[in-house]
Amino acid sequence: MTVLYIDADACPVKAEAERVATRNKVPMKLVCNGGLRPPANPLVELVIVAEGADEADKWIADNAGVGDVVVTSDMPLAARCVENGARVLRHNGERLTQANIGAQLAMRDLMADIRAADPFTQGSGKGFTKADRSRFLDALEREIRGAQKDT
């Protein structure tokens, strides 16, 4: 059975993901270190992991696999989930696959090096738009339907 895993700390599309999961009758797990209100939706489970760096990521990577969908912007987590056979989406609807995850990890490392070399370097700072939400909703619907066929 397909499960939708949300890397819930700082996820801007939790409500949208819940709508899609409910429409498709797919269980959804919000995984975080705490600080979220337990959902009223019976399909949505709040999973609170131990405090500490990357604990939520470890839990998701250990549980997500073929037939599941993961929503995250964390590239190392995305790489582990792709390796496990899960379908992975970023918050803007971009799909992460074996074909593009290496480039995403390299870009992440490059940007970390640039920021380390010049602490005054600022990120792009692009805001999360309605168009991003719309792309995410469309992409999540496609990924859930595809994941259901995988199982």
Image (tube, rainbow, N blue to C red):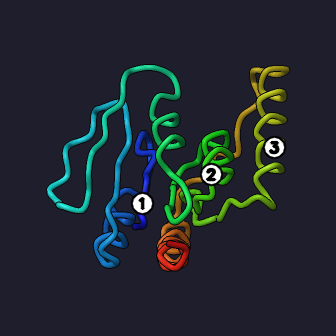
Residue under pointer 3: 107
Instruction: Please provide percent x and percent y for residue 108.
Output: 76, 39
Q: Amino acid at mark 2?
A: Asn
For image coordinates 68% across by 46% down, the residue present is: 79
Residue 94 percent coordinates (x, y): 64, 64
Q: At x 51% / y 78%, what residue is drawn?
A: 138
Residue annotated with mark 1: 4
Is residue 89 something one can see in this rendering? no
The CA distance from mark 1 to mark 2 is 14 Å
Amino acid under disc 1? Leu
Q: Which residue is mark 2?
A: 84
Q: Measured along the vertical axis of the image, is residue 78 above or below residue 134?
A: above
Task: Specify which label sits upstream in the sequence, 1 or 2.
Answer: 1
Q: Secondary structure at mark 3?
A: helix
In the depicted view, which residue is nearer to us: 71 or 84? Answer: 84
* Foreground label between 1 and 2: 2
Residue 52 numbered tag: none
> Percent from the top left, x then y, of residue 125?
63, 45
**Dot 2 alpha-carbon crowd within 10 angstroms: few under 14, some 14 to 19, many 20 or more:** some
- Residue at (65% x, 65% y) in the render: 95
